[in-house]
Amino acid sequence: MNLSWYCARFGRHGTLGRLVHLGQCSAPSPFREFRKSSYIYDKDVESGKIEPSYYSLFPQTLKSGAPPNGPFAVDVRKLRREFLKLQSKTHPDLARTEEDKSQYESASSQLNKAYSTLASPLSRALYLLESVGMGIEEDAGREMPQDPELLMEVYELLEEIENCQSEEQAADLSSSIESRIRRTEKEVEESFDAQDLAMAKKSTVTLKYWVNIREALKEWEPGKPFRMVH
Amino acid sequence: MNPLMRQIRPVASSAMRANPAAIIAARGARGYHQKVLDHYNKPRNVGSMDKDDINVGTGLVGAPACGDVMKLQIRVDDNGIISDVKFKTFGCGSAIASSSYLTELVRGMSLDEAGKVKNTTIAKELSLPPVKFTLTQRHIVHCSMLAEDAIKSAIKDYKAKRTSNLSKEASSISL
């Protein structure tokens, strides 16, 4: 996919990352440029180091960058404010020509993607693991040793949801899942901050299960056969 | 829609533009093959057995990437033949269909035969969509792989139980 753009107004060529700034494209861009080869990571060609570039889109909120340079925790309200400010600059309605419009659209959707990835601890953790080649998708549940106790706990919780009869029971289950999520998010944060990536991966997998169960519980209705949807 | 879905969807659609095979796979994912639907709507051998029974092996496996969990139990008779199979899967249609089909497939097999069942056999029988899109498009997840892992894990559990039981008996005899 060609990510370069041409600004008819100023007669300039550029790349997607700078397009975020197209509204005032004569000014120096505060944004790192995206490279054609890698959409979501900045790759330093010389060192071969991959850096999660979603972080560089939000220089105000995430000034110290991705872990291990910056903390895992993100001030989501601040991130949202910065995101909305940037989003107003990349709105496709600002485009002057049809050609510009598609560029605005892709910059805008890229910003959306970056924001939603970084805003939730689970997607942020998955993204960070992916950027160091420890993505969860890569195992597909095989190479990674499964934790039998976790699986048993997951299975029993799902059975409880399946057998759940009343709204009260569902509310109880929901609060017990929420407390698991909070506890596990804390573990994820601590392991990233301690640079213990193996532990980060393990707790991210656990978090992924809990969040999945939260989604499954949302689908629950009295008397309706329970099925996972994703 | 949750934030993660919002994030994954556009990735999947750009993959489809890039790869014609992906388009076919995605259609398959939406419009499941008839055999999948049949097993999904009328799953065979759903249930559970006493996991402490010495003749029962239990396999519990999960796919961290999608959160599916599958429990498969086998009852083995005196001749080492699988006489009964039960399963319970919390997961997508393909995962439920794969485990349902697997229960029918391995019943009557010896442990060795059942241990050789490959996910490709299951996928072929059910005409499962070959790929499922993941975050980076590079990786392929087969629900049928989960079923293969489940039967392997059930056999392992059964064998481990027998061995520990035999050694218990042996130690009680020597006493």
Image (cartoon, coloured by chain):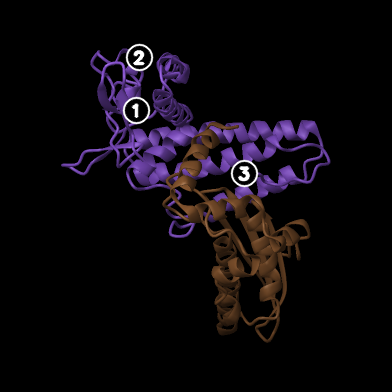
Chain letter of the residue beneath label 1 in the structure image = A
Q: Which mark is residue A230?
A: 3
User: What amino acid is labelled 2 in the image?
Assistant: Gly
Q: Position of residue A199 (x, y in %)?
A: 39, 44
Callout 3: SS: loop
The quarter of the image holding the N terminus of chain A is top left
Crowdedness near tag 3: few (<14), some (14–19) or many (≥20) residues, C-alpha within 10 Å: few
Would you call the spot at circle 1 few (<14 residues within 10 Å), some (14-19), or many (20 or more)?
Answer: many
Determine whether the residue tagged by mark 2 lies in a helix, strand or loop.
helix
C-alpha span from label 3 to label 1: 28 Å
Spot occupied by residue B96 in the image (x, y as percentages of width and height): 67, 57
Residue A121's x, y, as percent?
Answer: 47, 31
Q: Are marks 3 and 2 in contact (CB under 8 Å)?
A: no
Q: What is chain A's hue in the picture? A: purple
Q: Which residue is mark 1?
A: A55
Say which colour chain B has: brown
Residue A4: quarter of image: top left
Element carrying mark 1: helix
Q: Is residue A216 above or below residue B120?
A: above
Residue at far bottom of view: B79
Asked if both marks, 3 and 2, belong to the same chain, the answer given is yes
Q: Chain of mark 3?
A: A
Q: Looking at the picture, which amino acid does disc 3 mark?
A: His
Q: Of discs 2 and 1, which sits in the foreground?
A: 2
Q: Is residue A1 found left or right of B46 in the rendered image?
A: left
The answer to whether marks 3 and 1 mark residues whose Cβ atoms lie closer than 8 Å is no
Residue located beneath label 2 in the image = A23
